[in-house]
Image (cartoon, grey):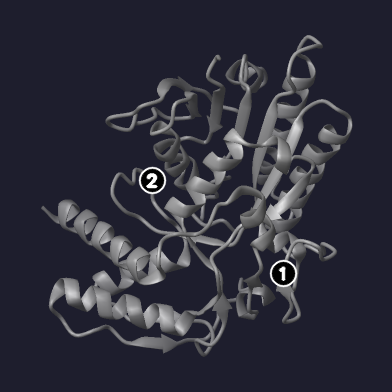
Amino acid sequence: MTRPLITVLGATGFIGSAVLRELAGRDVRIRAVARRPVPVPAGARAEIEVRTADLTRPGETAAALDGADVVLHTVLYSAATSTWRVEEGDTEAERVNVGLVRDIVAALAARAPGGPLPRVVLAGTVGQAGPTGGRILDGTEEDRPHGEYDRQKQAAERTLLAAHERGLLLGTSLRLPTVFGSGPGSTAHDRGVVSAMTRRALAGEPITMWHDGTVRRNLLYVADTARAFADAALDTEPLAGRHWLVGADRAQPLGDVFRTVADLVAERTGKPPVPVVSVEPPAHADPGDFADIEIDASAFRTATGWTARTPLDEALRSTVAHLADERERAAS
């Protein structure tokens, strides 16, 4: 039986590179697509083809998807501010976050009829549900996305699932919470708040919060995220036609998380823990920055058998060690 060809779009990105490392240990064929050269994981079991492409250029998406059985869309728009936030009316972000999904659908729809339908897994966000009002999200709530990034992700998901309804492909969206972390083999920077505060602590600077620290977040380690995508890639059909929430077992107060980070950094450096302090929020802060985000991912766990295996303390320790090593290498 021919091994499936899995095309990973955004294979040098934070999530995409982790997905590539996870899939490299499985008996599959991989086409790793990114704008810059893709590091091939050492000791890979998979057969890996590297392709450099600018997916915002006409025709390059179709070429990248030629012959693909499965497409994993993990491309993240990289703003000038180096954060995931998107300003209102940012057409460049819309081109990547939404336009690329339209290109994927068009390329796959242009294939000759017959044969198995191609499968597409999209990286979405739990933020598509909008303000939670204290509810625990389980994927059944009505979506009311608030920020521009969440609205663009919603538009992308709707485009994909509409193509599924038309019988053009098998589409699945995995809605992710706050993904964080670095560890062995990491080749891309985590731009999220956990790693940002870890870097501050390693530099001897206070860890800052825009609230009192009781705000809760579902924090998912990047290696567990990668396994979710790999599992979905190899067993997409039962998941097709809808979105799924993926997350850790429970949400954590960010104040507790940051104090753990400060202690782990102190353990690494031999210096006292940096303070964890509340500061005035900046003008660009969003109401969602001050709201708890708790999710129930039991539907995805039941459907796939996947679970978040990495304990939070272990994930934070691995992240601190990786970022400390990175800092030391840069200073030498």
Across and down, in percent, residue 314 comes to 33, 66
141 displayed left or right of 60: right
Across and down, in percent, residue 103 comes to 72, 27
**Closest to the observer, 60 or 178:** 178
Residue 86 in sight here: no
In the rendered image, the quadrant that contains the N terminus is: top right
Label 1 environment density (alpha carbons within 10 Å; few <14, some 14–19, many ≥20): some
Read off the residue under disc 2. Answer: 188
Q: Residue at x 79, y 20 (%)?
A: 109
The amino acid at mark 1 is Leu
Read off the residue under disc 1. Answer: 137
85 displayed left or right of 52: right
Q: Secondary structure at mark 1?
A: strand
- The answer to whether residue 81 is above or below residue 109 is below
Q: Residue at x 25, y 70 (%)?
A: 202
Label 2 environment density (alpha carbons within 10 Å; few <14, some 14–19, many ≥20): some
The picture quadrant where one finds residue 108 is top right
